[in-house]
Image: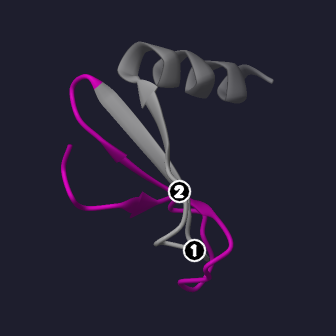
Amino acid sequence: MTSEWRKSSRSQNGADNCVEVVSSPSRAAVRDSKNPDGPVLVFASAEFAGFLKHLKTT
């Protein structure tokens, strides 16, 4: 995985009230921006892509 976490472009003024994502060709990881040293959820890339597709259609 790359080591650079990304936030949504809709995150306002650098606020720490969103999730951050880092990805590789095979995995995607998600964490809470308020707690960067806290737990991380890891998904297979196909699972994460399906999740994002669902979010965009609902």
Magenta span: 1-26
x and y percent of residue 40 in the render? 50, 51
What numbered label is drawn on residue 31? 2
**Badge 1: few (under 14), some or many (20 or more) residues near its Cα, within 10 Å?**
few
Give the amino acid at mark 1.
Asn
Q: Is residue 22 above or below residue 45?
A: below
Q: Residue at x 61, y 79 (%)?
A: 16
Label 2 element class: strand
Q: Residue at x 50, y 16 (%)?
A: 47
x and y percent of residue 41 in the render? 53, 42
Q: Quadrant of the N terminus?
A: top left
Label 1 element class: loop
**Badge 2: few (under 14), some or many (20 or more) residues near its Cα, within 10 Å?**
some
User: Would you identify the image quadrant in which residue 17 lies?
Assistant: bottom right
Q: Is residue 1 above or below residue 8?
A: above
- Label 1 belongs to which residue? 35
Of residues 20 and 40, the one drawn nearer to the viewer in this rendering: 40
Q: Mark 1 and mark 2 in contact? Answer it, CB < 8 Å.
A: yes
Coloured how?
one colour
Give the distance between the C-alpha atoms of the residues marked 1 and 2, in whole angstroms: 8 Å
x and y percent of residue 50 in the render? 55, 15
Q: Is residue 50 above or below residue 58?
A: above
Q: Residue furthest right?
A: 58
Q: Quadrant of the C terminus?
A: top right
User: Would you identify the image quadrant in which residue 57 lies?
Assistant: top right
Please say whether residue 7 is one of the residues in the magenta stretch.
yes
Give the amino acid at mark 2.
Arg
Please say whether residue 13 is one of the residues in the magenta stretch.
yes
Q: Residue at x 58, y 86 (%)?
A: 13
Q: Residue at x 42, y 43 (%)?
A: 29
Relative to residue 48, is residue 22 drawn left or right? left
Of residues 1 and 7, the one drawn nearer to the viewer in this rendering: 1
